Amino acid sequence: DPEDFQGLAHFTEHMVFLGSEKYPDQDEFSRVLALYGGQHNAYTSSEETVYFSEIGNEGVDKAMDVFARFFIDPTFEDSMVYKEIHAVDSEHKKNQPDTSRRLWHLLRSKANPANPVHMFSTGDLQTLQKEPESQGKSL
C-alpha cells in the first residue's frame, strides 16, 4: 500500500469482484459459483491478498474465465468506489473488538516506519477517503 492510501490492496480486493469488461454484471461470478454449488471469499493481510473459491467440476471452466477476467480487464466502476470504501470501513469496525486484531494493531503501531508492517493494511474511511481528499487526492 502507498503511505497516502493505506488499505489500498484491501480496497482493490473488494473492487475486482465487481465485474470485468467481458463480464460487467457485478453478480456474475457469484451466480456462476452458485449454479455449480460453489462459493468464494478473499482476504488481504499486510503481505498478501488471497482469493479462494470452491465449485463443482462441471463449472470450473466458466468460473475460471470469469475469475481471470477480474485481473485482465477489471471495470473498477467509479460508481462503486465509495460503496466499497464504506464496506472496507465496516469490516474494520466489525473487527475492532477482536483482541488478536487489537494486539496486531498495537504491534504495527510500534513497528519501524521503514518497515511495511507499520502500515494499516485493512484501511478505513479515514485512510481511503478523508485523509487523501484533504491532500487533493481520491481513488
Image (spheres, rainbow, N blue to C red):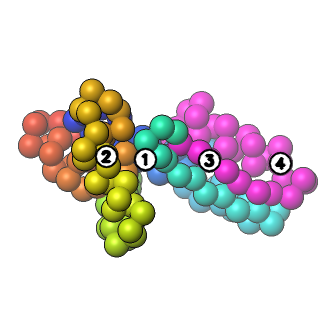
Horizontal and vertical percent for residue 91?
39, 64
Q: Looking at the image, is mark 2 or mark 1 nearer the viewer?
A: 2
Residue at 75% from the left image edge and 43% from the top image edge: 64
In terms of sequence position, does the residue under pointer 2 or pointer 3 come before the other? 3
Q: Which residue is mark 1?
A: 10
Residue located 28% across and 39% down the image: 111
For residue 134, what is the image quadrant? Answer: top left
Q: Which residue is mark 4?
A: 60
Where does the C terminus fall, quadrant-wise?
A: top left
- Residue at the farthest right position: 58
Q: Residue furthest top?
A: 114
Looking at the rendered structure, the kind of residue marked 2 is Arg
Label 3: element kind: strand
Residue 133 is left or right of residue 58, and the answer is left
In the drawing, what numbered circle is on residue 108? Answer: 2
> What element does badge 4 sit on?
helix
Circle 3 residue: 51
- Please name the amino acid that badge 3 sits on: Tyr
Please state the extent of the stretch shown in magenta in the rendering.
49-76
